[in-house]
């Protein structure tokens, strides 16, 4: 498989990461995942904007412009040739010796860029039927708005949920629901859509941006406010959202049905609108080529 390594596209086996790369040593880096539909990088601009926001928050000077990174990613997409996939790319702060906690001088130490592409198919079965989730205490750090490669807290939460027989973890901090293990979380009650507001406790999702737009277009009232476990369990609908998962209904939490225990009307309406938005973007992309 071909991968992007800084400015070059090489065989995966050719990539050499230094023992003292700060991503390996400290988890000192950031990442993004963009869904590719029929060769189109969906919401690429928004993903790149978020990468730059994350870089600023960790004081990382990126050694390329958004336009340069976009060209590299698009070249990788063409060379790999997978039309329905996801591209994962990360930037670490590079290799500085000796191993010190201080951030190295960006004029001396160059960040390291890596990107790979893997095939991805739409999770249609889960979107149609829904999944089961369990509440897990949100023990992560207070910089959840940074898309950091340090994901151990998220992994532990998902593992706890899986150990209890659930498909997903719903994270709870100080009594309020924040998000899922790697997705934003939503509930619907009496036709009103709710999600946790952006801030340090949740990742500002790219799919969340699109759902905001779709809700407005569909006339669905959206309230971005914190809600409790009790309020979520009493909701009519629940779903999670991410770039790869799109929108997936959550029909049961801690063995309790949400609403009627099946994907709800608002969830299905938003999912249909999301699929339509993807189709329109792909058509426009190909018409402009």
Image: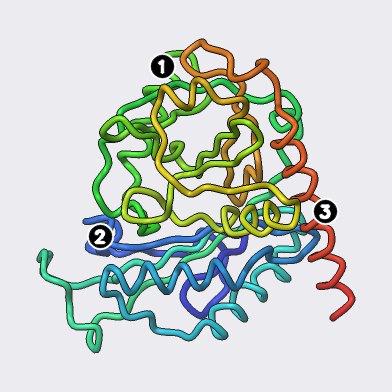
Mark nearer the viewer, 1 or 2: 1
Q: Nearer the viewer, residue 213 or 180?
A: 213
Helix, strand or loop for disc 2: loop
244 relative to 16, above or below: above
Mark 3 Cα-neighbour bin, 10 Å: few <14, some 14–19, many ≥20 = few
Q: Is residue 276 above or below residue 99?
A: above
- Which residue was labeled with disc 1? 163
Q: Is residue 252 left or right of residue 59?
A: right
Q: Quadrant of residue 210?
A: bottom right
Packing grade of label 2 (10 A; few <14, some 14-19, many >=20) is few
Q: In front of the other: label 3 or label 2?
A: 3
Secondary structure beneath label 1: helix
**Scheme of colours in the image:** rainbow
Give percent across and percent down for residue 180. 46, 37
Q: Which quadrant holds the C terminus?
A: bottom right
Q: Which residue is mark 3?
A: 276
**Left or right: 220, with 144 as reference point:** right
Q: Nearer the viewer, residue 248 or 226?
A: 226
Residue to which mark 2 is pinned? 19
Q: Secondary structure at mark 3?
A: helix
Q: Give how far across and how far down residue 92 sits, in percent.
A: 34, 66
């Amino acid at each position: 498989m071909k991968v992007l390594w800084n400015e070059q596209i090489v065989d995966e086996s050719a990539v050499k990461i230094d023992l003292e790369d700060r991503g390996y040593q400290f988890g000192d880096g950031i990442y993004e995942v963009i869904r590719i539909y029929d060769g189109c990088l969906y919401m690429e601009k928004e993903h790149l904007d978020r990468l730059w926001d994350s870089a600023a928050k960790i004081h990382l000077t990126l050694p390329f412009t958004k336009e340069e990174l976009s060209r590299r990613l698009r070249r990788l997409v063409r060379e790999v040739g997978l039309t329905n996939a996801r591209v994962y790319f990360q930037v670490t702060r590079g290799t500085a010796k000796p191993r010190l906690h201080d951030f190295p001088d960006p004029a001396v130490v160059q960040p390291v860029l890596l990107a790979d592409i893997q095939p991805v198919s739409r999770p249609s079965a889960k979107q149609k039927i829904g999944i089961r989730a369990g509440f897990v205490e949100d023990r992560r750090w207070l910089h959840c708005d940074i898309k950091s490669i340090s994901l151990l807290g998220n992994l532990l939460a998902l593992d706890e949920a899986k150990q209890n027989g659930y498909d997903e973890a719903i994270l709870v901090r100080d009594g309020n629901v924040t998000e899922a293990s790697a997705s934003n979380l939503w509930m619907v009650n009496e036709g009103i859509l709710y999600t946790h507001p952006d801030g340090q406790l949740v990742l500002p999702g790219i799919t969340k941006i699109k759902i905001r737009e779709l809700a407005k277009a569909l006339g669905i009232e959206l309230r971005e406010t914190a809600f409790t476990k009790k309020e979520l369990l009493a909701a009519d609908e629940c779903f999670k959202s991410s770039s790869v998962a799109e929108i997936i209904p959550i029909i049961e939490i801690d063995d309790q049905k949400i609403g009627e225990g099946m994907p709800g009307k608002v969830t299905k309406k938003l999912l249909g609108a999301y699929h339509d938005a993807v189709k329109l973007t792909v058509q426009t992309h190909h018409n402009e080529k």
